[in-house]
Amino acid sequence: MLAALALPVAATAGTVFLLDGRGWGHGVGLSQWGAEGYARHGYPYDSILAHYYPHTVLTAVQPRPVRVLLKRGQKSVRIGSASPFVVVDARGHTLHLPARAVVIDRRFMLRHRKLHQPLRFEPGAQPLQVDLAAYRGDVVVKKKDDGLMVVNVLALDRYLRGVVPWEAPMGWHVATYEAQAVAARSYTLATLHPGQDFDLFPDERSQMYGGVRAERPETNLAIGATAGKVLTYDGHVITAYYFSSSGGRTSAIQDAWPAMAPVPYLVSVADPYDYISPHHVWPTRLLSAAQLGATLHMSDVRDARVVLNSSERASSVRVLGSAGWRSFPALAIINRFKLGSNDFEIGALTLDAPTTAPTVFGSPLHVSGWVRGLGKARLQELTPAGWETVARVHTTPAGRFLVGLRPARSVELRLAYNGVAGDIVSYRVSPKVLLRADGTSLHVTVAPRLPLQVERLTRNEWRPVARGTGVFNRALRPGSYRVSVTGGGSYAATISAPVGLHG
């Protein structure tokens, strides 16, 4: 048994991997669900921000406009308003338009030859609409090599009105909206691109931006209550990253993005109230060795181990296949398995396939295997009433285990852990056949009591000469004899060694 426990890990029966994880997003900075948890526990927005961005200072700055890309590579774009509006070209020439929509394309420019691009559309009493979606501020249309580019130019806090409601769900606490507003304002100012055609994307590449249709009164009030407030470190506005759910602890920036240098205010911090998040803990995902190998394009996968970074999240995954160990960056695993974050682990459990002849009835059955990265697993047997636990598995530090059973018949076993189960492995039990020759008499005992067949060697062929059930005692003519037991569905078929009867 000690030798079996020392065997190296091998997935002879097909290892089953359990993928568990927590959180949603890159994990850096403010956890939105965690912030809502803090707000529900009575924390104001400045305390929430101080927790997620340590060593920063809440500072007031002067407002400024931002430029948000709405569209590019367009052959045409429809711009309108519910009230009259104005077009101003690159030379300051103006064109007054009525309350309707106009299509900006090649024909529009031919009709208005005096207008020089880029064109700046300025609203009247009502917001401008771009392809029926309303936006505050101005809209700039500029011709580029791949088509028309459309950029929304507006005051920073008007931009935030279209961001905060799309980044924080309805029904949250005011303090959460206020913290989100400050984080979004800081992130915006820290990521502007004054030398380019626009500053921000309207999606997750910058921040989700919906324009007027995203606005809500409660988030507008939060933006107003924190007007001009940003987070600074060493006198500079910080890149205030934020994300959905941490799973209980945020990530340092260098652990989320290894190419980035450490930043004093983007470190790993505990996130105790993130438990309210629907993504705080993921449902366990069961992966067979074949599924893992197919996704990673590896053959004969035997093991997979997560390598943790300083934030106690996955930095990479090492996978053992037929060609040896191979390492995958955590981001590759996230993308291939469509995971919510890099806060995951891979547990594994397997039963070793039987490597010897069937266990003889009444003898101990030694069941071995290994479990890693999980709590105590249970060894279960399939019975007429369903799966029943027959033993609780206790592993060595290396994860190996050995359990002794005395099955009354052939059994199907599996390992189970927290409602999930591994591969089913069949262990065959053969009848115990005792065969003894006493002069001209043959004495046979079969345990358990099963039908048996006595066979005699005749002309190099074993031929049946007698039958019995469980016990056989009879005088037979001289020759070589053996006993065959088919076993039925519950036992492995067995043929005894031959014995000789002499007259």
Image (tube, helix red, strand yellow):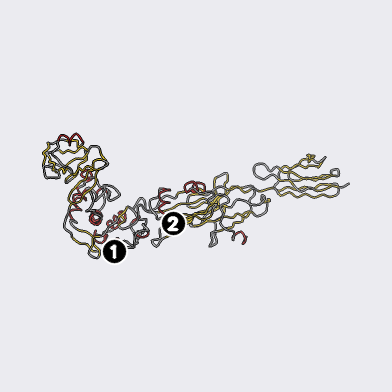
Q: Is residue 88 visible?
A: yes
Q: Is residue 450 above or below residue 350?
A: above
Q: Earlier in the sequence, mark 2 or mark 1?
A: 1
Amino acid marked by disc 2: Ser
Question: Residue at the spot x=46%, y=55% of the render?
Answer: 317
Residue at the spot of label 1: 54
Sort mark 2 into few (<14), some (14-19) or many (20+) by Cα contacts within 10 Å: some
Q: Is residue 47 found left or right of 382 in the rendered image?
A: left
- Camera-nearest residue between 74 and 115: 115
Residue at 71%, 48% in the rendered image: 447
Q: Nearer the viewer, mark 2 or mark 1?
A: 2
Q: Give the CA separation, mark 2 to mark 1.
A: 27 Å
Quadrant of the rendering where the N terminus is positioned: bottom right
Q: Residue most toward the right?
A: 503
Q: Position of residue 304 (x, y in %)?
A: 49, 54
Numbered disc 2: secondary structure: strand
Secondary structure at numbered mark 1? loop
Q: Name the residue tied to disc 2.
A: 316
Q: Is residue 218 among what the camera can see?
A: no
Q: Position of residue 80 (x, y in %)?
A: 17, 38
Image quadrant of residue 178? bottom left
- Residue, x 44% and y 53% (percent of image)? 20
Closest to the observer, 60 or 173: 60
